[in-house]
Image: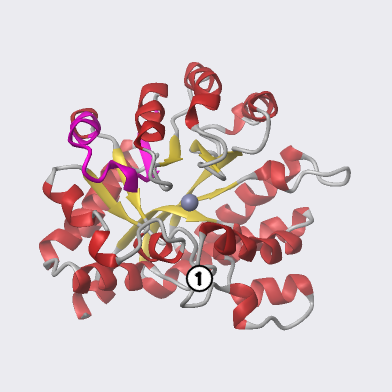
Amino acid sequence: MDYIKKLPKIELHCHLDGSLPRATIEELLGREVEDSELSVSEDCKSLTEYLQKFDLPLSALTSYAAFKKAAKDFVLSLQADNTIYAEVRFAPLLSVNANLKLRDIMEAVIEGLKEGKALTGIYVGLIACAMRHHEPEKSLRMFSEIRDYLGFGLNALDLAGDESKYPMSLFMDLFKKAKCMGYPFTIHAGECRDVRNVLLSVEAGALRIGHGIALSGQSDAIKLCKDKGIGIEMCPISNLQTKAVDDIKAYPLKEFLEAGLSVTVNTDNRTVSNSTMEKELEFVANEFALGEDVIKKLMINAANLAFADDNIKHNLLNKIL
Ligand SMILES: [Zn+2]
């Protein structure tokens, strides 16, 4: 659809490791890679199978130079689908080792994003993810150590990882402390059919929810999110691949839009899901017969929900409207 191609796009939910361009991975690894190593196949059966695809990009991100290049190349890749603003997230603690310190990783990514922005004019915010399988104490130490980057390259925090094994109840204290430290945050919740994780995330102070599929059919929880203006970062193609819903007919995008939730549409992982913002928007426009006004509304929602200052939001809205 021509109007989708031309539409300036905003993406709020995108993982750096799952979105590295093929050429970047090949250069960092020093070898060619197969499609099947990069992306899930049509018949991906589960989140577990989906998550296996992150081993390859993570194995390429082992130095300051690699992180900087990855971040810069990621920004350059956004030009292809006319993305004008993106927030990219990653879990720095997954790559810390004796030779690579947390602050070096943060600085490499911030520097790479800055270089990418200078070359393209695309503004990219950064979100640091805590991992569910890490002790909350360890994540709290990370939040303290990187606090001085907030507003200086770092925009917000997130919680990612296996939601079914590590429910939100384990992280209430961590995120209440993050809030006291002045961090805004989003939380992956309701990807695995348990609405309690969404409710607890909102209670802890999350301004946005990653996925939020479990809100489907939960009118009280939907009302709470609507009243509080919580952003819902939906990732349709990824959600179908990981079997967060069995079938596109069960996908609650239209239900959430009709209920008045602040819905956004995102790729989650451009490379692992073999997706772009253009593909995601074409997909939902076709599947749910959404008109141009609704597709535009998704972008307006994203501009309003961005973890960015009012000047940037204002600029984005000007470009979309
Ligand atoms: Zn995600």
**Label 1 beta carbon less than 8 Å to ligand 1:** no
Q: Quadrant of residue 282?
A: bottom left
- Above or below 291: residue 261: above
Q: Is residue 159 left or right of residue 106?
A: left
Residue 201, horizontal then vertical, whole percent: 41, 30
> Was residue 40 drawn as part of the magenta stretch in this picture?
no
| Most distant residue in the right direction | 98
Residue at 69% over, 62% down: 55
Residue 165, horizontal then vertical, whole percent: 57, 40
Specify the quadrant that holds the C terminus.
bottom left
Q: Mark 1 points at which residue?
A: 44
Residue at 77% over, 44% down: 96
Specify the quadrant that holds the N terminus.
bottom left
Task: Examine the rendering and report whether any part of residue 321 can be seen.
Answer: no
Residue at 62% over, 66% down: 53
Local packing at callout 1 (Cα closer than 10 Å; few below 14, some 14-19, many 20+) is some
Residue 274, horizontal then vertical, whole percent: 48, 73
Residue 293, horizontal then vertical, whole percent: 11, 61
Q: Is residue 146 left or right of residue 172?
A: right
Pick whichever, 169 or 18, lies toward us. Answer: 169
Pick whichever, 193 or 90, lies toward us. Answer: 193
Q: In this view, does 156 lie to the left or right of 299?
A: right
Q: Quadrant of residue 229?
A: top left
The boundaries of the magenta stretch are 206-225
Q: What element carries label 1?
A: loop
Q: Which amino acid does label 1 sit on?
A: Cys
> Was residue 224 drawn as part of the magenta stretch in this picture?
yes
Q: In this view, does 64 lie to the left or right of 241?
A: right
- Above or below 289: residue 300: above
Q: Total of numbered circles in the picture?
A: 1
Colouring method of the image: secondary structure
Task: Examine the rendering and report whether any part of residue 34 can be seen.
Answer: yes
